[in-house]
């Protein structure tokens, strides 16, 4: 039973290791990014509400095969709203 389990783990690990191998040629572009949003209400004495938002797009260019250089921008917003006042940070 132990040998079957060990063989299964090795088979999965080797397939994951080879899944990342690919040939990306010089001259290709790569684009991507992340977006996040969160809103929560604090149940403390002042009934504050916190809202966060972030976005970070990225772009890259393959200068040689399998080697890219690029740029990532990031924008974060944090807003806390109390019953008495509101604070916003960019």
Image: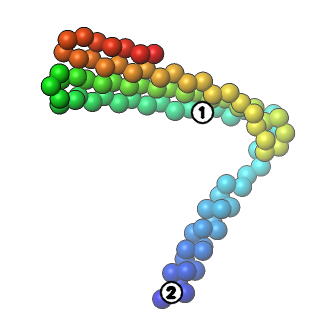
Residue depth check, mark 1 versus mark 2: number of the one nearer the observer: 2
Q: Position of residue 72 (x, y in %)?
A: 63, 28
| Res 32 label | 1
Going 25% across and 23% down the picture, which residue do you hit?
A: 49
> Would residue 28 be visible to someone looking at this image?
no
Q: Secondary structure at mark 2?
A: helix
- Farthest residue to the top: give it: 85
Q: Secondary structure at mark 1?
A: strand
Instruction: Give the position of the C terminus as an image quadrant.
Output: top left
Seen in the image, is 54 located left or right of residue 27? left
Q: Position of residue 69 (x, y in %)?
A: 75, 33
Q: Label 1 neighbourhood size at 10 Å, few (<14), some (14-19), many (20+)?
A: few
Vertical relation: 32 (above or below) 20: above
Seen in the image, is 83 located left or right of residue 88? left
The residues bearing labels 1 and 2 have C-alpha atoms spaced at a distance of 42 Å
Q: Residue 82's quadrant in the figure?
A: top left
- Farthest residue to the front: give it: 45
Q: Residue 62's quadrant in the figure?
A: top right
> Would residue 74 be visible to someone looking at this image?
yes
Vertical relation: 23 (above or below) 42: below
Foreground of the two, 5 or 25: 5
Q: Residue 20's quadrant in the figure?
A: bottom right
Foreground of the two, 25 or 40: 40
Seen in the image, is 84 located left or right of residue 6? left
Label 2 belongs to which residue?
A: 2
Q: Label 2 neighbourhood size at 10 Å, few (<14), some (14-19), many (20+)?
A: few
Foreground of the two, 63 or 72: 72
Going 18% across and 15% down the picture, which residue do you hit?
A: 83
């Amino acid at each position: 039973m132990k040998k079957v389990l060990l063989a299964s783990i090795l088979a999965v690990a080797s397939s994951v290791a080879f899944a990342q191998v690919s040939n990306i040629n010089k001259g290709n572009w790569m684009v991507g990014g992340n977006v996040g949003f969160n809103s929560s209400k604090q149940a403390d004495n002042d009934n504050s509400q916190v809202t966060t938002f972030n976005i970070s797009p990225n772009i890259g260019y393959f200068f040689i095969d399998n080697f890219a250089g690029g740029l990532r921008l990031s924008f974060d917003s944090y807003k806390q709203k109390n019953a008495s006042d509101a604070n916003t940070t960019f």
